[in-house]
Amino acid sequence: MTTLLLQNPLLTGTDTRPKPTLPQHNNITTAAGSARKRGTYYISCAGKQDDYHATLKALNSKGRFPRKSLGQHYMLNSEINDQLADAADVKEGDVVLEIGPGTGSLTNVLLDAGATVLAIEKDPHMVALVRERFSSTDRFKVLQEDFVKCHVRSLMSSLFQSTESLKSSAGYAKVVANIPFNISTDIVKQLLPMGDIFTEVVLLLQEETAVRLVEPVLRTSEYRPINIFVNFYSEPEYKIKVPRTNFFPQPKVDAAIVTFKLKQAADYPSVGSTKNFFSMVNSAFNEKRKMLRKSLQHLCTSLEIEEALGDVGLPATSRPEELTLDDFVKLHNLITEL
């Protein structure tokens, strides 16, 4: 196997840090069927196919090393980008929000499918790279922002208003992104309540996180408030496992593609106040070892909580990890009536 060294021209002097080496290329773990082929993709900085060689050369063109502080792990397998786009059924005329475009390999697939792409990128060097790469199309815009701090609603509204071809569209968009693992929960929390803007969210997540969000198991330590949150606002589905060898630098864990089909407000579970509902859920899990009649007694008396649990069909000794989303909704509604 040929080994590439990613040289950084910005480094001078006696820096002796080991240079990152090219990871072994490994194909994606495929699901039934195969991704549709969109042709050959090119990266302007390298003039070659969007594969692992081109990705490293693109980074090198900007004198960049992947930054651990930004959670940067670049995709080396173009087939996975096809799978991400396919999972969201990206087609001509779609509007797509991409988080952390990096060198633009996924962006290229989205544009090739006919979508208009708004990309949010924190790293100014990557902003410059993709802005240069896609300068010839009016269907791409990149903003230098920290996604977890930006106002997504305002940005999407501005995009629809400023782009002539989108003004007559339905006003809905999709999210397709290979995101930093270290901010995945923050991103999920920010996006899933936006069913009035996005129809679905497709993310490449750490596999352990993907499994925990999509397949929560009652009565385990992995069952948490985020599971209630995810199923309140969306219909999640685990799609495909992506081995860690498909990234540079190679992370310590595998990844997976997950889709979240967002619910409209009319389809949310019926609660008087979502704020109060999640406040109750968080209070319950803050004292996981305690029974709900103890952890929720700031809302009403222990006896009233026991009676409400009984009305829901649950034992008076119930703990939070024993309740489904539907159980929490019923319990909340009974308690607020007291």
Image: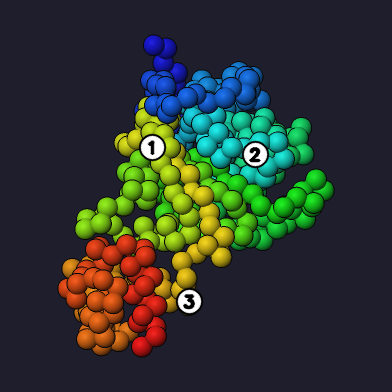
Name the colouring of the figure.
rainbow
- Residue 251: tell me if it is visible: no
Residue 37: percent from the left, percent from the top? 59, 22
Residue 273 disc label: 3
Labels 1, 2: front one: 1
Residue 306 disc label: none
The amino acid sitting under disc 2 is Ala
SS under mark 3: loop
Residue extending furthest toward the top: 1
SS under mark 1: strand
Residue 128 disc label: 2
Q: Residues within 10 Å of mark 2 (few under 14, many from 20)?
A: some
Tags 1 and 2 touching, CB below 8 Å: no
Q: Please name whichever residue, 306 or 7, is drawn nearer the observer in this view of the structure.
A: 306
Task: Quarter of the image for the C terminus: give it.
Answer: bottom left
- Residue 215: tell me if it is visible: yes
Q: CA distance from mark 1 to mark 2?
A: 27 Å
Position of 52 compared to 49: left or right?
Answer: left
Q: CA distance from mark 3 to mark 2?
A: 43 Å
The amino acid sitting under disc 1 is Ala
Taking the spot 34% from the left edge, 45% from the top edge, the residue there is 211
Taking the spot 55% from the left edge, 33% from the top edge, the residue there is 86
SS under mark 2: helix
